[in-house]
Amino acid sequence: MKAILALEDGTTFEGSSIGATGTVTGEVCCDTSVMGYQEILTDPACSGRVLVMTYPLIGNYGVCEEDNESSAPQAAGLVVTELARLHCNWRAREGMEPWLQRHNIVGIAGIDTRKIATLQRHKGGQRCCISTELSAEEAVAAAKATTPIETTAPVCRVTCPAPYHWEGDSRAWKLPNKTQGDLTNYTELPPISYKVVVYDLGVRRSVLRSLRQVGCDVTVVPASTTANDVLALRPDAVVISDGPGTTAPLTTEATEIKLLTDKLPVVGMGLGCQLLVTALGGTTRKLRVGHQGCNQPVKTLCDGKVAITTQNSISAIDADTLPAELRTTAVNLNDDTVAAVCGNTRPLFGVQYIPAAPTDAEDANGFYGQLVQTIKAVKAGKYNA
């Protein structure tokens, strides 16, 4: 079946329908990843966005539900150059095509996705429409009529409805045994030593898994949870997750986060980092081209080291409005935007990228290791920013 992809600037592409039939609209989101398509599609930060995979072949290793970052795909639609009709992976439970159909995800294949990425680079982010039932002109009109994501509150769609204690999953209870030099050998995880509350703006399951891997007992709460309710849980730290959209609709959430910053360690990632900054009086701005994909270079200012990170953000922190309580600790080398912040006197920090999973329970060089060290220092009364 034929399908149409239309951009709000009037550009149209004709391809083949994949997944479900129908019409969807959203904001174009180009991702450069070679693999991890399932994790990207199920990342709540992609809610309301049409995912465009620039790598030419997607779906070649199928789908395994254990790898989902949430209960179901979150992206509004999918655009690929070629969807693999056959897959090869001993862990796969089904192919990409039936998985998309089962979850009612409208997609299109046979598209030059790198051309879309080039258009986005030159013209900025665009709204779009994928349809198996509209004409090209109707699809362009639908794209133009789509509500911009920055004026909506997609966090409300993806946050949990009520607090819950995360019990983990089958991969959360073991870590690779690095001393054996064999990642198929495992050692038991450390005992639970810290209590952490996670504000769910659209949290990825891998984040919860990583927190458990460094010895954290994890309670997840809705984005609207008050500071008093969080403090009643007596956590050692608060983590603000990544999520979709911008901080503009999250004024109430920012107020509650501000109340927590004087009480205990607060850290954020992605949208959560931006919410921490806005809670303390800073501002954010929507990026002309979002930070999306697995090849975002980030430079740490203290030592000049560069890491290649995975990011999924449509906005950035305004460096000129950074609150006095925070300082920039890393920058994105593509556009010099703030990539990480740290508190000057208080146990606060955040990153604009998706933190890598810890390699061990005391991974001091990573986000989760830094969280553990911060909690330890605060407990011992020896915290030094």
Image (cartoon, rainbow, N blue to C red):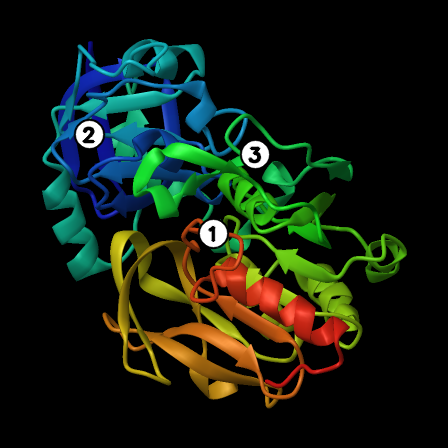
Query: Residue at 10% of width from left, 44% of height from top?
Result: 115
Residue 142 visible to the viewer: no
113 displayed left or right of 23: left
Label 2 is placed on what type of residue? Val
Residue for badge 2: 80
Q: Is residue 164 above or below residue 97?
A: below
Q: Position of residue 152 (x, y in %)?
A: 55, 49
The N terminus sits in image quarter: top left
Q: Position of residue 17 (x, y in %)?
A: 23, 16
Q: Is residue 194 above or below residue 332?
A: above
- Given residues 64 and 331, the one toward you in this image is 64
149 displayed left or right of 347: left
Q: CA distance from mark 3 to mark 2?
A: 35 Å
**Label whose residue precedes the other's in the sequence (3 or 1):** 3
- Residue 345 figure quarter: bottom right
Query: Residue at 40% of width from left, 52% of height from top?
Result: 356
Q: Are marks 1 and 2 in contact (CB under 8 Å)?
A: no
Label 1 is placed on what type of residue? Asp
Residue 343 is labelled as none
Residue for badge 1: 360
Q: CA distance from mark 3 to mark 1?
A: 12 Å
Q: CA distance from mark 1 to mark 2?
A: 36 Å
Q: Tag 2: Cα neighbours inside 10 Å, few (<14), some, or many (≥20)?
A: many
